[in-house]
Amino acid sequence: MPPLRRSRPGDVAVVLATALAATVALAGCSTGPDDDTLTVLNSATDSHEHAQNQRFFDRCAKPLGVKVQQTSVPADQVSSKALRMASSHSLTDILELDGSEVPQFADTGGLVPLREAGVATDGLSDSAVTMGSFKGTQYGIARSVNSLALIYNVDLLKKAGVEPPRTWDELKATAKRLTRGRTYGMAFSATPDADGVYQFLPFFWTAGGNEAHLDDGKGAPALQLWKDLVTAKSASSAVVTWNQQDVNDQFLAGRAAMMINGPWQVPVLDAHKDLHWAVAQIPVPEAGQSAQPPIGGTVMTLPRTGHTDRQRTAAKILDCLNEQRNQIDWGESVNNVPTMRAAAEQYKKQNPKLAAFADEVATARSRTTRVGASWPVVSDALSGAFQSVLTGKSSPAAALKQAQSRATSGK
């Protein structure tokens, strides 16, 4: 799934801590669901995803003699829904959060560490561990994750006589060669929100940028790269208004020969039988470097509800969901990469067309590793920086200096 769009945390941590404390204190006298029914709060509002989720929950719950009931709300409403449920002492046994939300909940003490709950985490990729962790403790586990890669139109590249670019210099040259008529060589999202930031991070991080120190100068070349692509008309100036779905629409319409996007677009791409597309690593500053895209997806956590027996059963369900066979089956059903290293390798063999995504996930990073619960403020500041540069209002260095000031002040 694409990155979560959400509002600022504000005083959420304080409210959440109070609500969760009350939930645990009153657990003994609260009216919960049936003893044989575990509850899950997630964002699986899509009917297909909801049904697939239920299939896997049923697979893991049946041997335990229990059932699983999902409550699904839009992704940007999960945290507020969890708050309301905590306040009414009806928080679910399993809470599925966007990876970037884990610090906000873990910081309150409202989540049970997976090790404490007895959930097995051996064999997970490093990137998956960091996505579910806060201050060195793992609170969430993802069955599968996603990231970004370069998706290109095979026919257009062949017609232009070029190969998928591997470095930034090659990207600029290739995008220029591919720009013809109404077709731009390159498309990406630079909206002032989660989509734009998610797409900017691979360039920012591989340049050496540090989200905890935006003004150290190392991230400026990434801003300059995006600016150069737009200035050369190799990418449309409209990227500042395109979210990731818009970028995919441009690619499908033949108005972009290459794009940055994620595996959630695969079903739409596959539906266009006359479109021949392939996936490559996101270009890096220098040959030999590995791309460092952000890791995306959701993690399953265990809230502190005070119901220890239910918690133990929920932990067993998480273990089952993350067995190798189940991870591979789930990953293939949603076009995401399994988080267990052995499962990811098998997934690559079974899905060679998506192998580049699996390779990118191996080197991907969590958005919150360096800044924790401050990520929403940093994200806002970073989006302001690339918007300012792409609209000609600021130089890269000045934009990042202003971004650091904004991140520090929290405004």
Image (tube, rainbow, N blue to C red):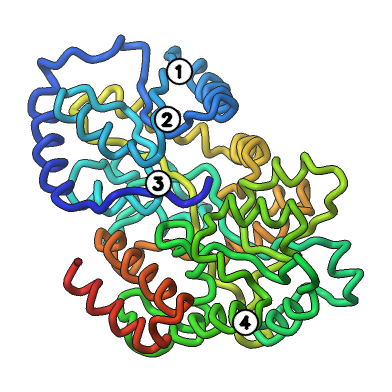
CA distance for labels 1 and 4: 47 Å
Query: Dot 1 lies on which element?
Result: helix
* 4 vs 3, front mark: 3
Q: Sequence-wise, which precedes: disc 1 or disc 4? A: 1
Looking at the picture, tell me which residue is in the foreground, 144 or 203: 203
Query: Dot 2 lies on which element?
Result: helix
- Mark 4 is surrounded, within 10 Å at the Cα level, by few (under 14), some (14 to 19) or many (20 or more) other residues, namely few
Instruction: Find the residue positioned furthest to the front.
Output: 181
From the viewer's perspective, tell me whether residue 193 is left or right of residue 342: left
Find disc 3 in the rendering and name its residue.
98
CA distance for labels 1 and 3: 27 Å
Looking at the picture, tell me which residue is in the foreground, 322 or 334: 334
Residue at horizontal 62 percent and vertical 82 percent from the top: 289
From the viewer's perspective, tell me whether residue 134 is left or right of residue 270: left
Are the residues at dot 2 and dot 1 in contact (C-beta closer than 8 Å)?
A: yes
Residue at horizontal 43 percent and vertical 19 percent from the top: 68
CA distance for labels 2 and 4: 40 Å
Query: Dot 4 lies on which element?
Result: loop
Residue 192 location, quadrant: bottom left
Q: Which mark is residue 289?
A: 4
Q: Is residue 131 above or below residue 293?
A: above
Looking at the picture, tell me which residue is in the foreground, 278 or 53: 278
Q: Amino acid at mark 2?
A: Lys
Find disc 2 in the rendering and name its residue.
316
- Mark 1 is surrounded, within 10 Å at the Cα level, by few (under 14), some (14 to 19) or many (20 or more) other residues, namely few
Find disc 1 in the rendering and name its residue.
64
- Quadrant (top left/top right/bottom left/bottom right) for the C terminus: bottom left
CA distance for labels 2 and 3: 21 Å
Query: Dot 3 lies on which element?
Result: strand
From the viewer's perspective, tell me whether residue 361 is left or right of residue 35: right
- Mark 2 is surrounded, within 10 Å at the Cα level, by few (under 14), some (14 to 19) or many (20 or more) other residues, namely some
